[in-house]
Image (tube, helix red, strand yellow):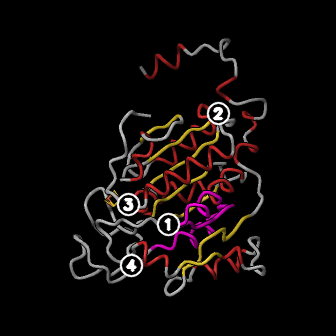
Amino acid sequence: MTEEKPDWCPGCGLYGIQTALKQALSELNLEPHKVFLATGIGCGSKMAHWINVYATHTLHGRLLPVAAGAKLANHSLTVIGMGGDGDGYGIGMGHFVHTMRRNIDILYLVNNNQIYGLTKGQASPTSEKGMKTKSTPFGVIETPVNPIAFAICSGATFVARGFAGDLEHLKWLIAEGIKHKGFSLIDILQPCITFNKINTFDYFRQRVYKINDNVGYKTSDAEAALKRSHEWGDKIPIGIFYQESREINEELEPQLAKEPLAYQDISSIDVAPIMEKFV
Ligand code: SF4
């Protein structure tokens, strides 16, 4: 953590996400030295510098391999990944799929502002069709990625959507995602007030509703979750879409059964030949 204050644009949705994350960690009584945050590249990925936990600001689209590596090296840590929609659903899409199907016990927060903010306003994988940006002056022609549907179909065991304008709800989702054993995705609607003039705070406030307030909604029903994930327009659902219990990768790795790798005594292993090979 640095002494500097966040330099996000005043009014950016990232301030709300930072507050919700800090409050969730604090309410769960997680000690800072037992939490590791890996971030990608983007406005929100600068979070690594502004939260009091162990953190690494990694490469564009590569935060999930770093988060997964940290979890496998020391599975007693709470490991969180954070990046943007371009980072995770574009450049890092391959890592996203394979981390989900392995069901590694990490929480992945995606600050989804539907634009590339740090590089000043190009269309991202979640930009809406027809949206005019610096890279699409005549409007986006592609269909946007649906991260909720994609995660449900790729083996994520906790799939949720939050909104940066509803801190209490987002804090609750983050806490539930941390408590969940397995890979958790929280796609967060995060208005970029500078470069996305369509998907604003007002736009979402008029549309979001909470699926888990509906007594008939069952988070164990994958088919219902998938159907709900396609709802986007006048009404946009937020909350936990899908949750299941499945063996995590760390339980299936025999080398991790005794204790975290980081605590295992390797003094009897001669590492000199390996070092010789690589150094
Ligand atoms: Fe936030 Fe957009 Fe400014 Fe980046 S460019 S800090 S996402 S408002």
Which sits in the foreground, 112 or 226?
Answer: 112
**Mark 4 touches mark 3? (CB < 8 Å):** no
Distance from the alpha carbon under mark 2 to that under mark 3: 34 Å
Distance from the alpha carbon under mark 2 to that under mark 1: 34 Å
Residue designated by label 1? 165
Residue found at x 75% / y 44% = 252
Q: Position of residue 198 (x, y in %)?
A: 35, 77
**Quadrant location of the N terminus?**
top left
- From the viewer's perspective, is 80 left or right of 120? right
Helix, strand or loop status at disc 1? loop
Helix, strand or loop status at disc 3? loop
Distance from the alpha carbon under mark 4 to that under mark 3: 20 Å
Q: Nearer the viewer, mark 4 or mark 2?
A: 4
Which sits in the foreground, 27 or 57?
Answer: 27
| Magenta residue span | 145-172
Amino acid type for the residue under numbered disc 4: Glu
**Marks 2 and 3, the one that precedes in the sequence:** 3
- From the viewer's perspective, is 119 left or right of 16? left
**Mark 2 touches mark 3? (CB < 8 Å):** no
73 relative to 13, above or below: above
3 relative to 125, above or below: above
Disc tally is 4
**Marks 4 and 3, the one that precedes in the sequence:** 3
Helix, strand or loop status at disc 4? loop
Label 3 lies in ligand 1 vicinity (Cβ under 8 Å): yes
Residue designated by label 4? 128
